Amino acid sequence: MSTKKFAWKDGAGEFLGFAIVAPILFWIVFMVISVYQVTMAEEKMIYATYLCGRSAVISNNVSEATQAGNAILSSLYTDDMIGGIIIPGARNASFKIENGTVAWVKGNIVVISVTQDLKPIIGVMKGIRTRQLAMMIEQSQEWRGI
């Protein structure tokens, strides 16, 4: 029975080290990209919530406010791009006016919310995000004397 020792050639240790470290480096790069994606998406959600809310509170009634908010939202989320970064599911953003039993009268407060399901590169950071903003109704049919 012969016992041969494996003869490592020069540079084999560096290759082995790279093979161990490379997946960790790629994971770190993908994590940085995911953090950037989520940050840009949340920033755009805050902006969208404000714009949808502004268009809603100057409407005459709840149905007009919902239509105005959805129109603004659909113009902002035209594709899967957010901040120049592709995020699958970016088009699935939704707009909602949460006023409960409050009448649509000038001076009442409504809560505007935009919800979006984010799916960045790294699955650890995926999930449904919601941004809410309380705004005062600035215009109503009662105020116009209609």
Image (cartoon, helix red, strand yellow):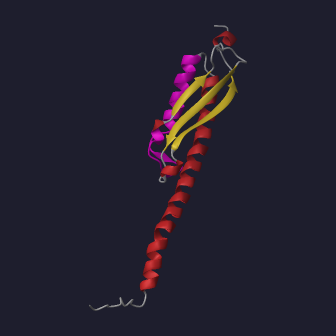
Residue at 58 percent of width and 40 percent of height: 45
Q: Residue at x 45, y 42 (%)?
A: 89
Residue 78: in magenta span: yes
Residue 4 position, x and y percent, is 32, 91
Relative placement, left or right, of 127 versus 136 is: left
Q: Which residue lies at the image location 58% right of the left edge and 17% below the top edge? A: 62
Corner quadrant of residue 54: top right
Give 7 or 4, whichever is nearer the viewer.
4
Would you place residue 29 above or below residue 65 in this image?
Answer: below
Query: Residue 17 at what x, y percent from top left?
Result: 47, 78
Placement of the C terminus among the 4 image quadrants: top right
Q: Which quadrant would residue 98 be assigned to in this image?
A: top right
The residue that appears at 52% across and 42% down in the rendered structure is 127
Q: Tell me if residue 49 is in the magenta stretch.
A: no
Q: Position of residue 75 (x, y in %)?
A: 50, 36
Where's residue 141, x and y in %?
64, 11
Residue 95 falls in which quadrant of the image?
top right
Q: If the image is split into quadrants, where does the N terminus sit?
A: bottom left
Span of residues in magenta = 62-91
Q: Nearer the viewer, residue 100 or 103?
A: 100
- Horizontally, residue 42 falls left or right of residue 118, namely right
Numbered disc total? 0
Relative to 114, does residue 25 appear above or below in the rendering? below
Residue that extends furthest to the front in the rendered view of this protein: 1
